Image (cartoon, rainbow, N blue to C red):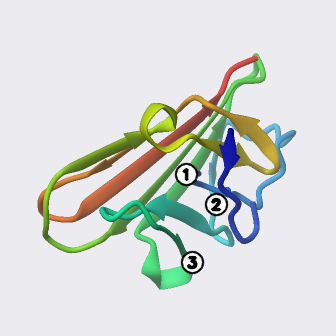
Amino acid sequence: MKELLGLAVAVAGMTFGVSYANANPAVPAVGCDCAVVLRNGAVASFTGAAREEIHVRYAENGNVVAKCQVDLGAGSQQNFDISNTGFNCFIDGVATANWHEVISASGQTTITCEIKK
């Protein structure tokens, strides 16, 4: 199985630099990078103003959900996950196969990565 690595932490990827053990229920991951699969199957990392939004939610039961949004520009709609990429998603170095990315025809791209305990 392939692994997609990001800059600070990766989702097929996404990588988040927020502590996995953080007790806050919702953390805007301001200083984090995320990586997404482009329409051509290549992977690109986004940081700062290049990404629209990153959120990481830590539940009391240990589950973590990370979401990143970027704009890739207009083109064909695409969907990616582990089944068609072979990539794992990483949140602060913890790997999971539970992720999904949607690139809309308008270019709005959302990747969601979940770690379930």
- Element assignment for label 1: strand
Neighbours of disc 1 within 10 Å: few (<14), some (14-19), many (20+): some
Which of 55 and 16 lies nearest the eye of the viewer? 16
Sequence-wise, the earlier of marks 1 and 3 is 3
- Element assignment for label 2: loop
Q: Which residue is tagged 1? A: 55
Q: Residue at x 76, y 17 (%)?
A: 117
Q: Quadrant of residue 66?
A: top right
Q: Residue at x 30, y 70 (%)?
A: 71
Neighbours of disc 2 within 10 Å: few (<14), some (14-19), many (20+): some
Sequence-wise, the earlier of marks 2 and 3 is 2
Q: Residue at x 56, y 51 (%)?
A: 12
- Amino acid of disc 2: Ala
What x and y, as percent, mark residue 7? 72, 71
Q: Which residue is tagged 2? A: 29
Which of 38 and 18 lies nearest the eye of the viewer? 38
- Element assignment for label 3: loop
Q: Which residue is tagged 3? A: 47
- Amino acid of disc 3: Thr
Determine contact: label 2, label 1, CB under 8 Å: yes
80 horizontally vs 66: left or right:
left
- Amino acid of disc 1: His
What x and y, as percent, mark residue 72? 29, 71
Work out which residue is located at the far bottom of the displayed protein and give it.
49
Work out which residue is located at the far front of the displayed protein and give it.
1
